[in-house]
Image (cartoon, helix red, strand yellow):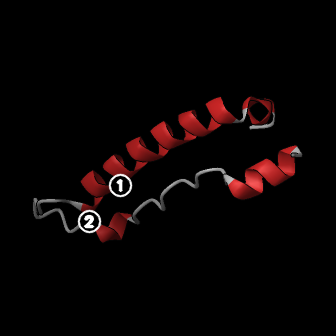
Amino acid sequence: MSDSAATAIDPRPQPPEAPLPSDCCNSGCDPCVNDTYAEELHAYRQALAAWLARHPEASSTA
């Protein structure tokens, strides 16, 4: 299987969309959109690390 076929079956994780500054109301919401984004970013980084371990050839082009 070619590299492009492998990544088509197992696509690279995409980063979460960052909230806009206006998305936070600064009222101490639980959860705050910034807290949710931080959790999503952490999960993305873990997923990306796992994906790069499965696709070491992609780390040179990242």
**Within 10 Å of the Cα at label 2, are there few (<14), some (14-19), or many (20+) other Cα atoms?**
few
- Residue at image point 38% right, 52% down: 40
Q: Residue 43, position in %: x, y?
A: 40, 45
Q: Residue furthest front?
A: 1
Residue type highlighted by circle 1 = Tyr
Which quadrant of the figure contains the C terminus?
Answer: top right
Circle 2 residue: 24
> What is the quadrant of residue 3 in the picture?
top right
Using the rendered view, name the quadrant where residue 23 is placed: bottom left
The residue located at (55%, 33%) in the rendering is: 49
In this view, the residue in front, 35 or 9, is 9
What residue sits 17% from the left and 59% below the top?
A: 31
SS at circle 2: loop
Amino acid type for the residue under numbered disc 2: Cys
Residue 16 lies left or right of residue 58; in this view the side is left
Residue drawn at x 35%, y 55% is 37
Query: Looking at the rendered structure, which numbered label has been put on residue 1?
Result: none
Give the residue pinned by disc 1. 37
Q: CA distance from mark 2 to mark 1?
A: 11 Å
State whether residue 54 is above or below residue 30: above
